[in-house]
Image (cartoon, rainbow, N blue to C red):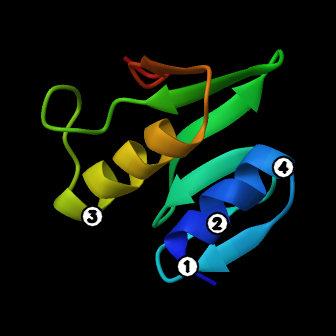
Amino acid sequence: MTNENVVWCWIKGESGKAGNLSTDGTSLYSYRLKIAERKDGLNRVYDYTSSGIYKSQTTSCHVGLALRLAGHSFLVLPPSY
């Protein structure tokens, strides 16, 4: 499975894993960090990029991939901020 496939699984509500990106169908994780979730019918992608709360280049790439593939997504600050 590729990272793109994992994001598509998240969008469809299915579980999937590829390397350090995984989903339980509701939340999307980079390593063990929740980077996105579907809540109240909306896709929320957390801003773990250089313009937000930077964690790593890999996580930033995972966030970008989720934003590109999940239409009608919102880039927001993580819940703890």
Point out residue 30 in the picture as x, y percentages from the top left corner: 46, 60
Bin the neighbour count of mark 2 within 10 Å (Cα to Cα): few under 14, some 14-19, many 20 and up: many
Quadrant (top left/top right/bottom left/bottom right) for the C terminus: top left
Which residue is found at the position 62% from the left and 51% from the top?
A: 28
Point out residue 49 in the picture as x, y percentages from the top left corner: 23, 38
Find numbered disc 3 in the image and state the secondary structure of the residue it sits on: helix
Q: Does the residue at mark 2 contact the one at mark 1 (Cβ under 8 Å)?
A: yes
Q: Does the residue at mark 3 contact the one at mark 4 (Cβ under 8 Å)?
A: no
Horizontal side of 32 relative to 72 (left or right) equals left
Say which quarter of the image contains residue 4.
bottom right
Residue at numbered disc 3 = 58
Find numbered disc 2 in the image and state the secondary structure of the residue it sits on: helix
Of the residues under marks 3 and 1, which one precedes in the sequence?
Answer: 1
- How far apart, in angstroms, are the residues tagged by discs 3 and 4? 23 Å
Residue at numbered disc 1 = 2
Residue at numbered disc 4 = 12
Of the residues under marks 3 and 4, which one precedes in the sequence?
Answer: 4
| Residue 56 can be seen, yes or no | yes
Count of numbered tags? 4
Q: Amino acid at mark 4?
A: Lys
- How far apart, in angstroms, are the residues tagged by discs 3 and 1? 14 Å
Of the residues under marks 2 and 4, which one precedes in the sequence?
Answer: 2
Horizontal side of 7 relative to 48 (left or right) equals right
Of the residues under marks 1 and 4, which one precedes in the sequence?
Answer: 1
Q: Does the residue at mark 3 contact the one at mark 2 (Cβ under 8 Å)?
A: no
Which residue is found at the position 74% from the left and 31% from the top?
A: 38
Which residue is found at the position 34% from the left and 30% from the top?
A: 47
Residue at numbered disc 2 = 6
Bin the neighbour count of mark 3 within 10 Å (Cα to Cα): few under 14, some 14-19, many 20 and up: some
Nearer to the camera, 34 or 17: 17
Point out residue 13 in the picture as x, y percentages from the top left corner: 86, 49
Q: Amino acid at mark 1?
A: Thr
